[in-house]
Amino acid sequence: MAADTREPQPNELPKGVVIGKDGKPCRSCTSKKDFASWAQMAKSSLKSGGGNVGAATAGVGAGAGAAAAAASANSSQQATPDDCPADVETLGRSTWTLLHSIAATYPKTPNTAQQSDLKTFMGVFSRLYPCWVCAEDFQEYMQKERIQVGSRDEFGKWLCEAHNAVNVKLGKQKFDCSKWEERWRTGWKDGRCD
């Protein structure tokens, strides 16, 4: 029996798997755990001859197939090498590190060209970001909260607030933006970064 080559439907995907604009699961928009769970379901479906992801749990007690796939995904997630494509969490952490590092090295009093370059960079960055859901969300944030590029402190605080807006959506703790420079530029006052 030939494998079904149709695209997976949203109701056939594990929770957390985001479909890309090409109709396929998006690695850059999905955590390793959720992507591995989907991959395991797809493999199970092909092995069972079902031909589609939805068939992966056919004939199995309610939710047992998905639970088995998730358990398998959890064990394989720990063994995933670092040289694999970045998931949404790795990409996010790396991106925030880059952006905060740019803020930390941005001039205290930038000239007009530097301000223009930063605005252009952030605009292009927000359109090219690999996770399309994240990209669109950041573009919306930038429309509501205009980017502040008048000084290092201004941009650093704006970026910190943007990061906090994402943290709130993800159910994470907010960062005290009065400490952005210690975290990303000078190091903590207790000397632990020295």
Image (cartoon, rainbow, N blue to C red):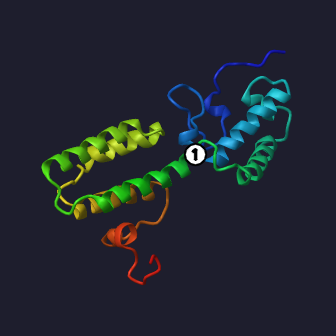
Task: Relative to 57, say whether 141 is above or below.
Answer: below
Q: Is residue 157 left or right of residue 136?
A: left
Q: Is residue 7 left or right of residue 73?
A: left
**Image quadrant in which you'd find residue 37:** top right
Residue 145 point in image, percent of width and height: 25, 51
Looking at the image, which residue sits at the far bottom?
Answer: 190
Q: Amino acid at mark 1?
A: Asp
Looking at the image, which residue sits at the far top?
Answer: 2
**Image quadrant in which you'd find residue 87:** top right
**Image quadrant in which you'd find residue 42:** top right
From the image, tell me which residue sits under label 1.
87
Kindly state the secondary structure of the residue where label 1 is placed.
loop
Question: Which quadrant, please, contains the N terminus?
Answer: top right
Residue 165 shows in the view: yes
Few, some or many residues within 10 Å of mark 1 (<14, 14–19, 20+):
some
Task: Relative to 19, say whether 107 is above or below.
Answer: below
